[in-house]
Amino acid sequence: MVTLGQIQMRGFSTLSPKGIKDWLKHCATCEKTAQWSMLEVLAMFDAYLTITEFTPTTLCSDDFAGLRGFLSTEMGFSEKASKGITSQLCKMIIAIDILSKEKISLALKKPALECNEKYAARQPSKSQLLIYKSLFPTMEPGRVVYVDFASLGSALNESSLQFLSRLLSKYFASLNIEHAETDAGLIIALTQGLLHQNPSLDFGDISLSMAKSTSFISGARIHAEWQMHNAGYFRGDAYENWKLISGVILNFFVANNILHLSKAGRQLLVTD
C-alpha cells in the first residue's frame, strides 16, 4: 500500500507549483469543514496523476472515478473514505469552474467496482508506484531515506514488500539520515541473498535456523571481503565494511527473527 506520508515525502510530481497555489487560493472556503486538508487531497490527486502518467489538461468524470479506484486499490481506503476524499477534490474543481456539478456528480455515483476498473484501465505504472513505496522517514524531521526495492526485481512480491516495508518503517524511524542511507543499501543486499536462497518463500516466512543462519552469515562475509579486495581496498577497510554489515545483521535481521545466532554465528560478526 502507498501511504499519505510517502506521497507527501515524494512531493508533487505532476501538478505545477503555480497550479497548486491557484487551487489553494480559490478554494480556501472548501477546507473549513473538510476532514482532509486541501493540500493533502491535492497530494493524493497528484500521486494518482503521476502513477497513471496522466496530464490533466482536460478533466472528465471518469478521471475522478479513477481517483476513487486509486484511493481504494493502492491506499486501502474504504469506499466511504475514497468517496469523501474525491468529493473534497470535486468541490475544489467546481469552485474553480473546471467542471460542472452535474458532471462531477457522475463520478461520485459510480459503484466502487466500476471505479476500480476505471483506475485499472489507466494501466498504473508499477515503477512509479514503487518509488512511493520506497520512501521512509528517519528520525530527522524532513529527511527521507530511499530504499532500492526495484533492484530486487521479481523476487520481491507484494506480500514480501509489505512485510519488509513494515520492518523498515520502524527501523529507520530511530536512525539519522546518514545511518539510514548506509543501512538501506546493506539491508537490500542481504535481503537479495535471502530471497535468492529461499525462492519458494515470501520474505515474511523466512526464519533461518541457527545452522542456516551461520552458513548465510559466513557466505555474506566471504562475499563482502571478496568485493572489497577486488575493489582495491585494504584489509582495514574490509574490516570496517564488515563491521557495518554486522550491525545490520544484528539490529535488523536478528532483531526481527529472520536470522538466529549460534555461538559460531556470533563469532563471525564484528560487534566491538
Image (cartoon, helix red, strand yellow):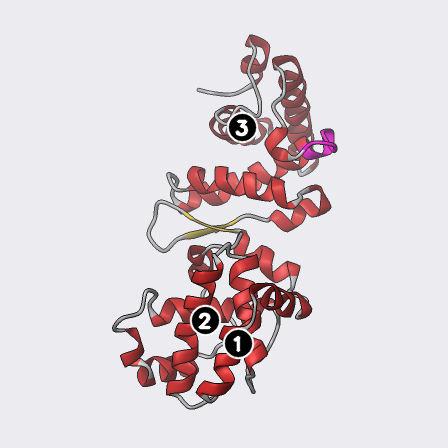
Q: Of the residues shown, which amino acid type is indicated by label 1? A: Ala
Determine whether label 2 and label 1 are within 8 Å by CB. Answer: yes
SS for callout 2: helix
Comparing 104 with 160, the one in front is 104
Assess whether residue 198 is covered by the magenta stretch: yes
Q: Nearer the viewer, mark 1 or mark 3?
A: 1
Q: Specify start and end residues of the magenta stretch as a single range.
A: 195-201
Assess whether residue 29 is covered by the magenta stretch: no
SS for callout 1: helix
Residue 182 visible in the picture: yes
The mark nearer the N terminus, 2 or 1, is: 2
The mark nearer the N terminus, 1 or 3, is: 1
Q: Is residue 12 left or right of residue 127?
A: left
Comparing 172 with 30, the one in front is 30
Q: Which residue is the site of mark 1?
A: 107
Q: Residue at x 56, y 37 (%)?
A: 187
> Residue 245, image x and y in percent?
54, 30
